[in-house]
Amino acid sequence: MEAKEACGVFGVYAPGRAVAHLTFDGLFALQHRGQESAGMAVSDGDAITVMKDMGLVTTVFDERKLSGLRGHMAIGHTRYSTAGSSDWINAQPVFRGVGRAGFALGHNGNLTNTAALAESAGMLPGLVSSDSDLVAELLGQCFPPDLPERTRAEVGGDLERSLMAVLPLVEGAFSFVLMDADRVIGVRDPNGFRPLCLGRLDATDEFEQGWVLASESPALDVIGATFIRELEPGEMVVIDGTEVRSERPFPVERLNPKLCIFEFVYFARPDTKLYGNEVHGARRRMGQLLAGQAPVPADLVMGVPDSGVPAAEGYAVASGIPYGQGLVKNRYIGRTFIAPTQAERANGVRRKLNPLRENISGKRVVVVDDSIVRGTTTRAMVTMLRESGATEVHLRISSPPFRWPCFYGIDTPDTNELLASIMSLPEICEFLDVDSLEYLSLDHLVQAIDAPGAGFCDACLTGNYPVPVPVDFSQRAELSGAAELSGAASGTQA
Ligand code: SF4
């Protein structure tokens, strides 16, 4: 997929343990959610130390830096910019020096009412550098003056009280981790657009029980924590000792679960648990259902690494066509530069993927991928397969056509760059140079996820935005209608 994830968050409360090292391991497990910058804030109960920089987790932190970050609690963040530029100033956690020791915040998601919030708070344009910075500013404004006569217990409630006042005003997608000197807090927006889960570090002879928050469950696994549960949409958990307290800062009428359906298709790791199921199984079922919905005679089924692979396995099992590897991905591809032109972006595919010519040559191949956004990389990949001797290339996509931009924390191009928004199905087939193209239907996608009664955001597939977005799409309805009439959603074969 050519869209970028939008951040990973992590938090740990674990007296006695090396929390900076635990946070490093947790962030490393969440590296796929953001590769532009990484950071953490650590507290020893008296002061908060923040360390952050541009680059991968392993670039920003080394043993020497981690050893210097001492305390009993920490939060961490990996970033891909969706609101605010890719600069050091926007690396997270964000810190505000209010109250006795200040507080730090890490954010996954995108707010949709940033302009209104900034205006209502009396902030001049340009005063805040990102929507996460704006929330930190609003919270900071709610802190009372730190008068010497206030007890530690009174001061300790300031961050929580500020959150209870500010969160109801905030709209859009946000999974937050926050901390002051004594507590770690996790918040999930009332729609639960982005994931956030809770884990426990069991007590040992050496250490007392600890608690962990993470965007995805593998970040718990790597540090030996037990998955307890996903936070509920609209839930705030406060960890300030051995127990976890749950608060509800949002009015009940705003609670409407809409977990991003693309977390299942592409964004989340395959070993992540969402809505109680492992993502890998859902991706396999997407492929199985796709095989039933869009069969084609072929000699080989292959997946586009990495996220197309489980769906390809499912397609192969259900269709009876042998599964094989057709493309090798460079495992060490980290953050690649964003090439300024489409042609350069297409060339970049060769750095990432290389064909297995002997597996492909002389064969009719079914290629399974998770989605098509701009189509540039898909087209380059198809060219590669044809040059390697594939006699037919049948493309199968394990999600419906991606037609609308995301405003909830994923970096997607504008509508006029989204292939399914500007071309009919036959035009897409011609552009990509494939013999046939089919997309998994939305019904089948939901069926594959297998979470009966669960709510999803599918706005980039349907244009139905569950929370109002700061853009007028009325003029773009024509485009969407054109694509619908072309049969792109129904998967007509070319
Ligand atoms: S618009 Fe698409 S990518 Fe964005 S949150 Fe909704 S389903 Fe996810």
Image (cartoon, rainbow, N blue to C red):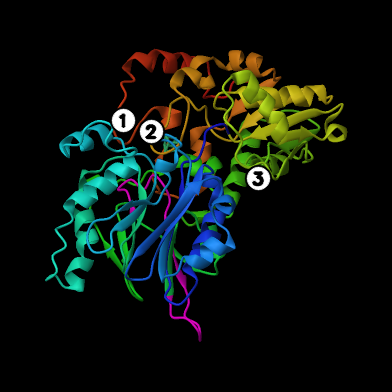
Bounds of the magenta span? 187-209
User: Ligand 1: does it lie within 8 Å of the C-beta at label 2?
Assistant: yes
Q: As rendered, which of 484 and 126 lies closer to the eye?
A: 126
**Secondary structure beneath label 2:** loop
User: Residue 259: x and y, percent?
Assistant: 41, 45
User: Is residue 198 in the magenta section?
Assistant: yes
Query: Quadrant of residue 256 in the image?
Result: top left
The residue labelled by disc 1 is 469
Q: Is residue 301 above or below residue 285?
A: above
Closer to the camera in the image, 151 or 267: 151
Which mark sits nearer the N-terminus, 3 or 1?
3
Q: CA distance from mark 3 to mark 2?
A: 27 Å
Compare residues 216 and 322 and report the one nearer the observer: 216
Instruction: Kindly identify the residue that appears in the image at 54 percent across and 41 percent down.
Output: 265
Q: Are marks 1 and 2 in contact (CB under 8 Å)?
A: yes
Q: Is residue 398 left or right of residue 196?
A: right
Residue tagged by mark 2? 407
Q: Which residue is mark 3?
A: 310
The 10 Å Cα crowd at callout 2, few under 14, some 14 to 19, many 20 or more, is many
Residue 237: mark in rendering: none
User: Which of the two residues, 352 or 195, is positioned nearer the viewer here?
Assistant: 352
Give the mark nearer the N terminus: 3 vs 2: 3
Q: Position of residue 235 (x, y in %)?
A: 30, 56
Magenta stretch encompasses residue 80: no
Is residue 494 at least partly visible in the picture? Answer: no
Q: Is residue 424 left or right of residue 313?
A: left
Mark sitting earlier along the chain (1/2): 2
